[in-house]
Image (cartoon, coloured by chain):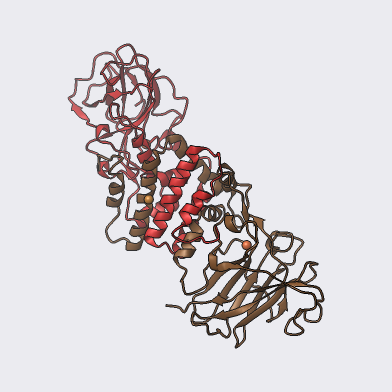
Chain colours: A red, B brown
Amino acid sequence: MRDVTADNITDVFMSYMGEGIDPRLKEVLGSLVTHLHAFAREVNLTHEEWNQGIAFLEAAGAISDKERHEFVLLSDVLGLSSLVDMLHSRPEGTSSSVLGPFHISGSPPLAVGGDLRKDFDEPVLLVEGIVKDPDGNPIPGATLDIWQTAPNGLYSSQDPDQDTYSFHGLQTVGADGRYAFTSVRPVEYTVPSDGPVGDILRACGRHPWRPSHLHFIAEAEGFRPLVTEVFPEDDPYLDQDTVFGVRKDLVMRYEEMPAGSFPAEGFELSGKVDEGYLRVRFDLTLVPRD
Amino acid sequence: MRDVTADNITDVFMSYMGEGIDPRLKEVLGSLVTHLHAFAREVNLTHEEWNQGIAFLEAAGAISDKERHEFVLLSDVLGLSSLVDMLHSRPEGTSSSVLGPFHISGSPPLAVGGDLRKDFDEPVLLVEGIVKDPDGNPIPGATLDIWQTAPNGLYSSQDPDQDTYSFHGLQTVGADGRYAFTSVRPVEYTVPSDGPVGDILRACGRHPWRPSHLHFIAEAEGFRPLVTEVFPEDDPYLDQDTVFGVRKDLVMRYEEMPAGSFPAEGFELSGKVDEGYLRVRFDLTLVPRD
Ligand SMILES: [Cu+2]
Ligand SMILES: [Fe+3]
Ligand SMILES: [Fe+3]
């Protein structure tokens, strides 16, 4: 096309696509470019703003490495990651939420009723629930990969003072579908804000905080894997998670349990907890594979 | 917001913007995110496709450095760079076109009628025209920064065998607004296709070629600077410039001039060209500053 104009350039872009290319690539890239062009037209994007955008992308590239994933963080704070999660969540199952950058593979087995608190001197949190299908039937043999922050707000992978698998465990439920473990309250934390994405947050008058949460990956044969998080209803950041991870059905409640009421059996800490503790009951519903 | 959904997440994003932030930032980022979310919904973007997108951005970041600007190239091949150019072109002036990555500062002065061909053994190309305002009046003292490929398809900055300013010159026009120089035909070339952007071109069934062109930056006091390129009408890639730089008014024509007709004076090569040569006449119209 020798007569490219601001009005026809999107069509020209589409006309450059070759014959016989992957139809899904054509659909996705065509849609992306159509919306990108519409954005530039809508705001009448200037050369200076375009330059700022390029400089941002180059800076995000420069700070990225095997550990630091600035483009993932960008997608998170723009809500794209959560949107993709929600587009593929099923209403009949527990909502999915962001995986986040702190998951590590190979967590050690954690028996039903096992303990993650170890030597940390914080009030006990007891978490339990049923892994079930949309009809409410338990799913025997489901596995739950569990991870959370230590009381200092750090995941083990961020914290040289913690063991590798501190506050990580892999639990396999029995015939009743029940999972259960003891831990401590996870705490709120900030996403990395010392890079270009942090500059965007500041320019937008936004904070980098996430509400506290427990992470789960639930898997069972014949079911879609569920990557999710659960959030306490009293967290100060619940209504302003900087990565948009909160869903209505992922909000849980800490029940304050009186001293002397800790279960006498079935937990690694049974017989060792005299004081009051916090209890969360949260069921996870998995959806069968298509 | 504790009830983020695929339908409301764009509104939630907007609601996170702080009070008193720069209104243009809010407008631009709000529009960008609105279109980004609309894209993800429209194609029902999958986690796997999101992963491919992140991997693409990380790869583009990794290959980028002071010399290599993969994100600029991405913007170029998606048509965004040209769209921004066109949004800010004025219909009463010559169209602007992409600057490209090969411009270098500090080109040596080139007298009106001067020569860029030097020792290259190619047919002479004579280029001339008037730098004028939208009413057709010449603009005395306008400067023209001129650059192009050598016959091997390389700019001097890409080619250790060329002098730094080979095929580069800075011409200042006189009272008649006329520029003129001799050179050789520029040749078509490919954008760098050994990186992630090249992978996109291949996946789309697109080639990396640009039609041959002469680059100009025209500047004059009281006028908007013009960054542009001109393209010969017989170039095989004229209708498929991979960076969308061709505009209808930037197409020029090589006139084949007979042996013995080279101007007897006014050119550095006057008296030295007996054979036939090519001639281009192309006027450049600058628009007054607002
Ligand atoms: Cu759009
Ligand atoms: Fe987390
Ligand atoms: Fe060029």
Q: Which quarter of the rendered picture does the C terminus of chain A lie within?
A: top left
Q: Position of residue B73 (x, y in %)?
A: 56, 54
Relative height, residue A97 to residue B245 (above, below): above
State the residue lying farthest toward the left. A258
State which quarter of the image contains the N terminus of chain A: bottom right
Q: Is residue A67 left or right of residue A266?
A: right
Q: x%, y% of residue B148? A: 67, 66
Tell me: A43 left or right of B278.
Answer: left
Spot the residue most to the bottom.
Answer: B175
Residue B100's x, y, as percent?
Answer: 58, 61
Asked if one can make out residue B109 in the rendered structure from this viewpoint, the answer is no
What residue lies at 72% left-to-right and 79% top-to-bottom? B114
Q: Quadrant of residue B138?
A: bottom right
Please determine whether, in this image, residue A226 is positioned above or below residue B7.
Answer: above
Q: Indicate left or right for B110 with A178 as reference.
A: right
Instruction: Report whether residue A233 is seen.
Output: yes
Q: Residue at x 77, y 79 (%)?
A: B261
Residue B126 location, quadrant: bottom right
Above/below status of A112 relative to A121: above
Query: Which of these two is toward me, B236 or A179?
Result: B236
Q: Indicate the quadrant of ligand 2 in the picture.
A: top left
Q: Nearer the viewer, residue A115 or B30?
A: B30
What is the residue that sits farthest to the top in this orientation?
A175
Q: How many marks?
A: 0
Which of A166/A223 is in front? Answer: A223
Residue shown at 30%/19% (left/top)?
A133
Q: Find residue A244 and report its horizontal and vertical position in percent.
A: 32, 42
Q: Nearer the viewer, residue A201 or B185?
A: B185
Side of A174 where B61 appears, left or right: right
